Amino acid sequence: MKFEVYCDESNPDVLASGKPRVQHLMIGSLWLPAELREEIKSRVGVLRQMHQAWGEIKWGRVSPNRQDFYVELIDLFVSYGDNLRFRCIAVDRSQLNLALHDNDGELGFYKFYYQLLHHWILDFNDYRIFCDVKSNRDPKRLPVLARCLSRTNLSSSIDSIQSLPSHEVVLIQLCDLLLGAARSRINVTLRDGTAKAVVVQRLERALGRVLAPTDKTEEKFNIFKIRLQGGW
């Protein structure tokens, strides 16, 4: 079966700054059967028309006057069940040892990208992976990531990994929204009574739980808080 994966990241400065703004770097991914891509895009387009919401879909743009639009995007995500799935990885800066990544934050970032993707790639499927455009010091980061994923998933096919500008790709934008909801809980930045709180609470009611690190078997909305210091 052919799948597509749309990815976005949040707070990459955690790997580079001595004073990052938040505790966790987070990378998110939205997974769907390739055959559903156009249908989902069309349904998002219908919601845009209904709410006259033509700008880029972003967590940072959730506001009172766009609250209903973003709530309906959450409902759309939920409505597809396991045919539209989300997974993110959270990296705690207090556990981070860049010496293990040759003191190279960019290298560390793509190692975490690998951990995000690898565990959801299943045998006998084909995958195309799309990442938001990111300026890399080393232009080979994505080809190396593709090669590493291919070598550790021999019974599946990684057809491509490519970067695309998020403002042109609505499914990367939807990933940004879901990642924003997750990071607002993981980084403890969500404020009660805001439009963002309403959006998060809608998602949490649908999932039947508060957004928090999940068991690895969670398939709809998986939050992987990686343990960088080992242990159980």
Image: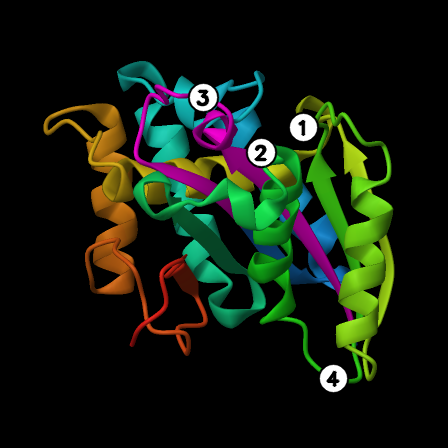
Q: Nearer the viewer, residue 140 or 53?
A: 140
Q: Earlier in the sequence, mark 1 or mark 4?
A: 4
Point out residue 196 in the picture as x, y percentages from the top left corner.
27, 29
- In the picture of the structure, the residue carrying the numbered disc 4 is 123
Q: Earlier in the sequence, mark 1 or mark 2?
A: 1
Please say if the residues under marks 1 and 2 sit with CB atoms less than 8 Å apart: yes
- In the picture of the structure, the residue carrying the numbered disc 1 is 166
- Residues under labels 1 and 2: Cα distance? 6 Å
Amino acid on which the number 4 mark rests in the picture: Asp
| Mark 3 surroundings: few (<14), some (14-19) or many (≥20) residues within 10 A | few
- In the picture of the structure, the residue carrying the numbered disc 2 is 173
- In the picture of the structure, the residue carrying the numbered disc 3 is 17
Badge 1 marks a residue whose secondary structure is: helix
Residue numbers of the magenta segment: 2-28
- Residues under labels 2 and 4: Cα distance? 28 Å
Amino acid on which the number 3 mark rests in the picture: Ser
Amino acid on which the number 2 mark rests in the picture: Gln
Which image quadrant for residue 231? bottom left
Which image quadrant for residue 147? bottom right
Please say if the residues under marks 1 and 3 sit with CB atoms less than 8 Å apart: no
Point out residue 32 in the picture as x, y percentages from the top left corner.
65, 61
In this rendering, the label closer to the viewer, 1 or 4: 4
| Mark 2 surroundings: few (<14), some (14-19) or many (≥20) residues within 10 A | many
- Residues under labels 3 and 2: Cα distance? 26 Å
